[in-house]
Image: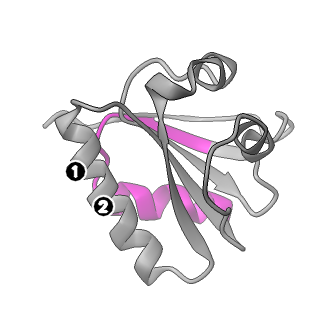
Amino acid sequence: TAAPDTEPVEAAEPGAWARAAAAGVPGEPGERATLLQFSSAFCAPCRATRRVLGEVAAVVPGVAHVEVDAEHHLQLVRDLDVRRTPTTLVLDAAGREVTRAAGAPTKQQVLAGLEAAL
């Protein structure tokens, strides 16, 4: 499996969680950080990503995993410049994007991305 591409994001950007909530994405943000996963129905790497993010959220206090069906939230996908599934946005406590990974990340990559948010 190819490693996902990661890129830092400017912290001054408007809150991604606020945009997701306004778009009707179900779920609650984490107290400390949120892993916002964009998936599509027939995406095998999305299932692997769901498992990894769920495991991380279960062991890191205050971190939530919220999955977004990209096909049902196309405007949000465009607004947040999500170009493929899976894409994971790591959001800080204020709901701002800190970093993102396109592709299926490893648990170590997710934990490293969370360090920037926590």
Mark 2: which amino acid? Val
Q: Which residues are magenta?
A: 99-118
Q: Residues within 10 Å of mark 2 (few under 14, many from 20)?
A: some
Q: Which mark is residue 38?
A: none
Residue 117 lies in the magenta-colored region:
yes
Amino acid type indicated by mark 1: Ala
**Measured from the top left, where is residue 36 in percent x and y?**
55, 48
Instruction: Residue at 85% x, 35% y: name it.
Output: 14
Residue 58 placement, left or right of 43: right
Identify the mark at residue 52; answer none if there is no mark.
2
The tag on residue 48 is: 1
Q: Secondary structure at mark 1?
A: helix
Q: Residue at the location (32% across, 35% down)? A: 4
Q: Is residue 40 above or below residue 35?
A: above
Residue 112 is situated, as x and y percent measured from the top left of the image, at 46, 60
State the separation of the CA atoms marked 2 and 1: 6 Å
Using the rendered view, name the quadrant where residue 92 is placed: bottom right
Find out whether the residues at labels 2 and 1 contact each other: C-beta distance under 8 Å. Answer: yes
12 within the magenta span: no
- The secondary element bearing badge 2 is classed as helix
Please state the horizontal and vertical placement of residue 41, each as a whole percent of the image.
29, 32
Of the 4 image quadrants, the one containing the N terminus is top left
